[in-house]
Amino acid sequence: MGSDPERDRVLVGGLEPVRRIVIVEHDPTWPDRFEAERARIAAALGDRALDIQHIGSTSVPGLAAKPIVDICVTVADVDDDAAFGRSLIEAGYELRVREQDHRMFRTPERDVHVHVYAQGSHEIADYLDLRDWLRVDAEGRARYESVKRELSMRAWADVNEYADAKSDVVQDTLRRARAWRCERHRAVVRRLFDEVWNGRQVDVVDELYSPDVAFDYTPYAALVRGRDAIRGSLERAWTAFPDYHEELLSMTAEGWRVAIHLRITGTQSGHWGPLAPTGKRLEFEEMALLTFDSEGLVVHQRGIVDNLNALRQAGVIPWPRP
């Protein structure tokens, strides 16, 4: 195979021919190896590592794989090599791939690959979608493993060609994984309506929200964080409107976010912010965007409420003239 300037620029050290790809049965010690490497990376990068995740086939229990532990490290700017590259090299990793929006380091033994991406990269979501879906779908695991084993029997000029040959099954699995992820998020939203917002089961907040969730309803209120902030907001709403009720009007899930349009109704029998009880039944709408983490917990809730319409119904401000 001739020289390829672009390939040689991306692959530090150039192509590394392989005789065959080795697929082995799942090793239960792989998660332990990840934890050891995670600790080493965390010590090297400190808070520059925004997240460190075990990805790839070795992160899926029961799935046969190449005996290489893949790790995904999230940083603020992946093209700022000075912020993390030297630290990873000093920690014992070698740079293998340098391409736009991605760096890959590995151990000298080539049994650990460390992929570095910027926060918000779609590749991170893809890795986690693929991992989490294969963890829960036995049929998907079997299909994925079958393709890998069949491809491993062929001769490849480089391991990257083997990876490219898996692209069809990977893309199909990702399509299924994304649909599963969206449905899981929809189920959380339905539980929020049924059990929390209308069911008043405050303890369920701990099941559905991240401990450091951001609750953002600016400019109506200051941005606050944590489950206690969620509970406090609910208690204030239920006190102001003892018959408080939320009705889901529409819901759209895409990726790791869900957008909802809802209607709020209730009789204002308590203080609503600075507004004294009016005894009037109010009806107003809200738009909210919920962002989830890989565990399926809400990490950010951003909402906009039609308070102007509610204040008109309460008689605080006049309705516009015809």
Image: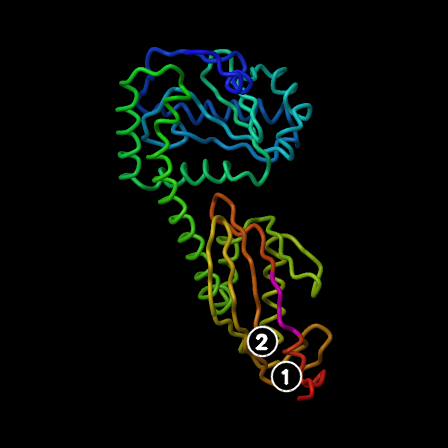
Magenta residue span:
303-307
Q: Which residue is mark 1?
A: 313
Decide: few, some or many residues near mark 2? Use Cα within 10 Å; few <14, some 14-19, many ≥20: some
Distance of mark 2 from mark 1, alpha carbons? 9 Å
Amino acid type at image mark 1: Gln
Quadrant location of the N terminus in the rendered image: top left
Q: Residue 284 has which mark?
A: 2
- Which residue shows up at 65% across the image and 73% down it? 307
- Check if residue 306 falls in the magenta segment: yes
- Which residue shows up at 38% across the image and 48% down it? 180
- Would you say 20 lies left or right of 207 here? left
Position of residue 243 relative to residue 194, above or below, is below
Residue 107 image offset from top left, x and y in percent: 51, 15
Among the two numbered marks 2 and 1 on one chain, the one whose residue lies closer to the N terminus: 2
Amino acid type at image mark 2: Phe
Decide: few, some or many residues near mark 1? Use Cα within 10 Å; few <14, some 14-19, many ≥20: some
- Circles 2, 1 touching at the beta carbon (< 8 Å): yes
- Please tell me whether mark 2 sits on a helix, a strand or a loop: strand
Q: Front-most of 266 and 143?
A: 143
Tally of marks: 2
- Residue 223: quadrant of the picture: bottom right
Q: Residue 106 has which mark?
A: none
- Which residue shows up at 32% across the image and 20% down it? 23
Residue 196 image offset from top left, x and y in percent: 50, 64
- Please tell me whether mark 1 sits on a helix, a strand or a loop: helix
Mostly what secondary structure, the magenta segment? strand
Q: Front-most of 9 and 266?
A: 9
Residue 141 image offset from top left, x and y in percent: 30, 35
Q: Front-most of 282 and 179?
A: 179
